Image (tube, rainbow, N blue to C red):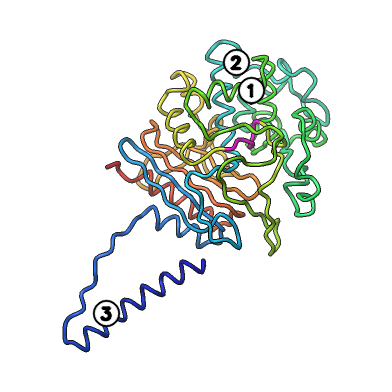
Amino acid sequence: MHVLARRRRDLLALSGLAAVLIAASTGMPAVAKPQRTDPLQQQVDAIHDTGTVGVSAEVTSPGTHDTARAGTAGTGTRRPMPRNGRFRIGSATKTFTAAVVLQLVGEGRMSLEDTVEQWLPGVVRGNGNDGSRITVRQLLQHTSGIRDVGPEIAALNSADGYRAERFRSYTPEELVRTAMRHTPKFSPGKGWSYSNTNYVLAAMIIHKVSGRSWAQEVRDRVIRPLGLRDTSTPGSVPFILGPHAHAYAAFGTDTDTDVTALDSSMAVGAGSIISTTHDLNRFYAALLGGRLLAPAQLDEMTATEPAPELGVNYGLGLAEIPLSCGGSYFGHRGELLGYVTWAGTTRHGTRTAVVYGTSDGSRDTQRAMTTLVDRQLCRTSS
């Protein structure tokens, strides 16, 4: 438990005891001052208590904007978590990528039923992989059967690997070739398995269809139109520019490593975007509110099927998660080496919640994060 938080509680307890003692000595009844409770702050504190170094959250709805922070911006420092600090959003990037693909579909420049081979001849081939049997829809929905390249990236899997390769750059072609060394998990459309390789391929297809890089298309189609001023596609730049908290990963050990610096080119299209809680709220509200996609494409995105690995339903770059108060919300979990986030929005984008932490996410951390998003989206806006 954080030292400052514990000290604050101790002082409160002592002040309460003093009031009782004074009342006893004077014969006057002790009157406790009513204390206001902030549900969002309590939920952020609960996440921090699971072991994260820092936590920050923001919830928005028409006429309301609530934020809460806990912990520090780095171990060994008293600096608080930065207001609207920047962080790597990890797999929440997939929602951006899927939105760009669906915009291209809406413009008639490609189809969800196009095959990977049609746009990327010879790229998905070998060891039973066959791009002529895999559609764009199956990439976005994780039903392609293609193996995840993540386990092959040294910087993501051990402290030694991180120190040796944190500044290494990858090309999308190199990442896909690495994934092609392995046989598929299942035949296309015959199962569900989360794979970052799917979205690396989606980024490559965006480039082929548009003639411009994935990063350029995301900037011009999403970031700039929505005014996401603190959101960026960093490419091979390993540093987070602007205010940010440090990230930490234990790699399955008892020792945390500062992993803030990272060339995230290994996650192009799949997990490389840098953003803030404020910008992510704006993005998901605009997306589900119909500002980025035509109704037909938004319907495609939110048409979900069971994703057994996640225990939820999954559409095209969006998960659908049940709400404890009834109904469901859409959003995405994100994690890229020391930054863990949950972003969610109600079905029509009227209320959004984003939270992130700066350490490995334990099961308790994940449970506390999903609880925060669930309870905040279940609240009626005031």
Q: Earlier in the sequence, mark 3 or mark 2?
A: 3
**Residue 158: x percent and y percent?**
75, 53
Circle 2: residue type: Ser
Disc 1, SS: helix
The correct choice, above or below, for 187 with respect to 80 in the image is above
Determine which of the numbered discs, if any, sits on residue 136 in the image: 1
Determine which of the numbered discs, if any, sits on residue 19 in the image: 3
The correct choice, above or below, for 155 with respect to 195 in the image is below
State the image quarter where residue 77 is shown: bottom right
Which of label 3 and label 2 is nearer to you?
Answer: 3
Most prominent secondary structure in the magenta stretch?
A: loop
Which of label 3 and label 1 is nearer to you?
Answer: 3
Distance in Å between CA atoms under marks 3 and 2 = 71 Å
- Chain part drawn in magenta: 269-274
The correct choice, above or below, for 282 with respect to 112 in the image is below
Give yes or no for contact between labels 3 and 1 (Cβ–Cβ under 8 Å). no
**Residue drawn at (66%, 17%), measured in percent from left and top?**
212
Q: How many marks?
A: 3
- Report the front residue among 3 and 370: 3
**Residue drawn at (28%, 64%), measured in percent from left and top?**
35
State the image quarter where residue 125 is shown: top right
Q: Is residue 184 left or right of residue 303?
A: right
**Quadrant of the rendering where the C terminus is positioned:** top left
Give yes or no for contact between labels 1 and 2 (Cβ–Cβ under 8 Å). yes
Q: Earlier in the sequence, mark 3 or mark 1?
A: 3
- Report the front residue among 267 and 242: 242
Badge 1: residue crowd in 10 Å (few <14, some 14–19, many ≥20): many
Distance in Å between CA atoms under marks 1 and 2 = 8 Å
Badge 2: residue crowd in 10 Å (few <14, some 14–19, many ≥20): some
Badge 3: residue crowd in 10 Å (few <14, some 14–19, many ≥20): some
Circle 1: residue type: Val
